[in-house]
Image (cartoon, grey):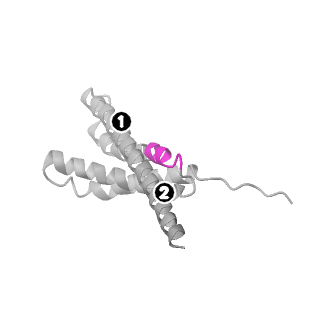
Amino acid sequence: MKKTAGKRQEEQGSAWMGVMGSLLKGGLLALAVTLALLLLCAAAVSARWMSQAAMERCVVAVCVLGATVGGALSMRRHREAALVLGVGTGLMLFLLLLSAGILFYEEAPVVQSIPGILCACLCGGGIAGILGRKTKKKRRR
């Protein structure tokens, strides 16, 4: 009896590690997509194709897009918990962006922009979770 309980715990631990690995892969892809798009937006501001005021709105849109792409990757194997994985990926993206901001600028980013970026990352992950969830099969009578 103890052998089956240990086996079940091992399977649960293995499943947990698989979910966390997927979440990490999705978060890193979300960060890469977000940084690449932010680089393009910065180039557009530098070339004067876009105003500085538009850049603030662009940051929020890029965070939504990055979290959506990363969330879609993270739930590739685990569609049962799609919304949780999507929102988790958005939270991971936010934490990675916040960590990078603190590391590179040696101070916390502008406090006014933190809630907007957090909401954008969570909403982007939520969008991926809603669109990527497992569909229920219809039963025939």
Height in image: 13 above or below 41?
A: below
Specify whether residue 125 is in view.
yes
| Residue 86 image point, x, y percent | 47, 53
Instruction: Quadrant for the N terminus, please.
Output: bottom right
Residue 2 location (% of width, % of height) = 50, 72
Residue 31 within the magenta-colored segment of the rendering: no
Residue 82 is marked as none
Q: Quadrant location of residue 116?
A: bottom left
Q: Are marks 1 and 2 in contact (CB under 8 Å)?
A: no
* Residue at left offset 31%, top offset 38%: 35
Residue drawn where x is 39% and y is 43% of the image: 30
Where residue 54 sits, quadrant-wise, is top left
Name the residue nearer the viewer: 128 or 82. 82
Q: Quadrant of the C terminus?
A: bottom right
Q: Secondary structure at mark 2?
A: helix
Task: State whether residue 66 is above or below residue 42.
Answer: below
| Callout 2 amino acid | Ala
- Amino acid type assigned to the residue bearing label 1 in the image: Leu
Q: Main secondary structure of the magenta part?
A: helix
Q: Disc 2 marks which residue?
A: 15
Q: Read off the magenta span.
A: 68-77
In the image, residue 44 lies at what x, y percent? Answer: 31, 30
Instruction: Give the mark nearer the N terminus: 1 vs 2.
Output: 2
Label 2 neighbour load within 10 Å: few <14, some 14-19, many 20+: few
Judge left or right: residue 74 versus residue 98: right
Mark 1 surroundings: few (<14), some (14-19) or many (≥20) residues within 10 A = some
Residue 126 position, x and y percent, is 48, 55
**Residue ranking furthest to the top:** 47
Can residue 123 be seen here? The reply is: no
Q: Looking at the image, which is closer to me, 38 or 54?
A: 38
Disc 1 marks which residue? 37
